[in-house]
Amino acid sequence: MQNIRIGFGYDVHQLSKDRKLFLGGIEIPSELGLLGHSDADVLLHAVCDALLGALALGDIGKHFPNNDPKFKDIDSKILLKESYKLVKEKGFTLGNLDASLVLEKPKILPHLEKIKLSISSILECSTDQVSIKATTSEKLGFVGREEGAEAYATVLLFKID
């Protein structure tokens, strides 16, 4: 196995009036939340997929299926913690995470530092190893119509000696 691995993750969730909005492990005040089997934290789900993908461990659906009742409404911080546990069991550690969140509203900038702290705590790293960017889709597509949100994540993993 190689000493350096790169993983990419993507996730998307529909917006709903009947849900709270969780992004990066924190609750964000909003009229709309994300719909899903878990708490639907689109950002953490993309990070999970990036971590799992870097080591060819499958995806979030393989490890935490959305038809399994034990994952109903689960806190996605738990999913990320369990995904990172699998990474550590394979002898790897995080070099860095770079992620982008695409959502028309609410504005994420006021919450970015709390999101970085949340994620870095789970991934047992410093906040300077975690880059979270937020953007809109300039009113284009399903994100622009405020029907959903999407997130992209890339991780760099290093083999621990």
Image (cartoon, grey):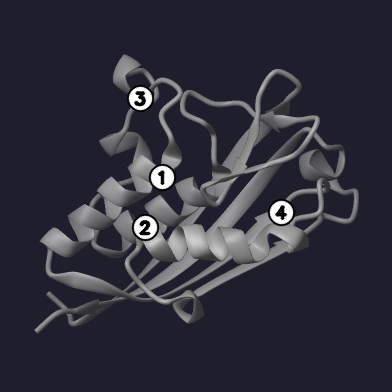
Q: Which residue lies furthest to the left in this view?
A: 161
- The crowd level at tag 2 (other Cα within 10 Å; few <14, some 14-19, many 20+) is some
Q: Is mark 1 on a helix, strand or loop?
A: helix
| Residue at 54%, 34% in the rendered image | 40
Q: Which residue lies furthest to the top in this view?
A: 69
Q: Distance between the residues labelled 2 and 1?
A: 7 Å
Indicate the position of residue 23 as horizontal and vertical percent values: 60, 47
Seen in the picture, residue 158 relative to 124 is either above or below; the reply is: below
* Three-letter amino acid code at the position of disc 1: Lys
| Residue at 39%, 62% in the rendered image | 121
- The crowd level at tag 3 (other Cα within 10 Å; few <14, some 14-19, many 20+) is some
> According to the image, label 2 marks what residue?
122
Indicate the position of residue 89 as horizontal and vertical percent values: 12, 59
Q: How far apart are marks 1 and 3 (CA)?
A: 12 Å
> According to the image, label 4 marks what residue?
102
Decide which of 4, 99 is in the foreground and name it. 99
Q: Distance between the residues labelled 4 and 3?
A: 25 Å
> According to the image, label 1 marks what residue?
77
* Three-letter amino acid code at the position of disc 3: Phe
Q: Which of marks 1 and 3 is in front?
A: 1
> According to the image, label 3 marks what residue?
71
